[in-house]
Amino acid sequence: MKSFFKRFMVTIKGLIIGSSMAVPGVSGGTMAIVLGIYDRLLSAISGIRKNFKENALFLVRFGLGSAIGLVLFYELIGHLLEVFPIPVAALFFGAVIGGVPTLLSKIKPSTVTAKFCITSVLWGILGVAIVLGVANILEILKWIGAIGPDVTSLVSNADSITFTNVLLWIVTGFVISIALILPGISTSHMLIILGITSILSMPLPALAIIGISLLVGIFAITKPLEWAMNRFTRPTYCVIIGFVLGSLWDIFEERIIPGFAALGTVWWHWALTLGSAVVLFIGGLIGLLYLSRFSDD
């Protein structure tokens, strides 16, 4: 019964990860990290040939939950974010914070020294800087003069089969794989930067090429990432914590700040919004702390 419940929790975690991808800044990798399933996913992908049956069944259970989450809850959560941006964003904000203790447990030393604390913080700051840099790559390129001030995406949404577009589709697949594997990098945000407005509306050859490059990218990334997590555990997890914390800025920028600006001056709007946000934040925090007990790492 216990093993069945643990397998069932893999599907539940996949469902949460799939549905949460509607939230800006909450990437699939971020939610996998805070749910305590990230290491297991990496080992299942990178070691698929070593223990094919066990790893394949794990990935199927996880993939099934993710697909259900995407289909059933992605649009719903996206709609709720538009109608109730602050409370819903607070729920996921609390969920992300609730997963940080799981990450900290990976780097807990036998003794805590000043050097340990300083270097850990510096690695974490590096992670935050990387995530914020990726999220604001267009602004950075404009600032250094690499692109014009009126550029809104790095490429156009192409649908004709040309050599340039094929390269674009390959890059798109790799970008999606990076966003899926690395925590803190939002898939939807990266596609907007590339200028891909709708993958499903693209021609079948484009979908095939994107799918192939996506799979190649996933297998190409997981092996060195797993090696870094095993070989340089503390620096890697500190950077990942920075990824996770840095990704919270998108929730503030995209939902919470505009949500407060739209509240107006009616006092009970503020009271109701803040009260529900606090409740949902605590609910997300406690919920993730509970789910982290069923770690698959």
Image (cartoon, rainbow, N blue to C red):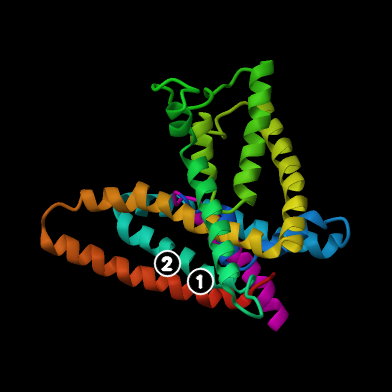
Residue 296's disc number:
none
Q: Position of residue 240 (x, y in %)?
A: 59, 58
Mark 2 element type = helix
Please give the name of the residue rendered at 60% of the width and 53% of the height, measured from the top-left corner: 67
Residue 143 shows in this picture:
yes
Q: Which residue is at the front of the view, 230 or 191? A: 230
Q: Is residue 84 magenta?
A: no
Left or right, 215 with respect to 73, comes to: right
Q: Which residue is farthest right?
A: 50
User: Which residue is under mark 1?
Assistant: 288
Q: Which residue is at the front of the view, 73 or 46? A: 46
Q: Are marks 2 and 1 in contact (CB under 8 Å)?
A: yes
Q: Residues within 10 Å of mark 2 (few under 14, many from 20)?
A: many
User: Which residue is under mark 2?
Assistant: 94
Q: Magenta part mainly helix, strand or loop?
A: helix
Q: Which residue is farthest left?
A: 266
Figure quadrant of the C terminus: bottom right
What segment carries the magenta color? 1-24
> Residue flagged by tag 1: what amino acid is it?
Leu
Q: Residues within 10 Å of mark 1 (few under 14, many from 20)?
A: many
Residue 1 shows in this picture:
no
Disc with the residue nearer the chain's start (2 vs 1): 2
Q: Position of residue 35 (x, y in %)?
A: 58, 67
Figure quadrant of the N terminus: bottom right
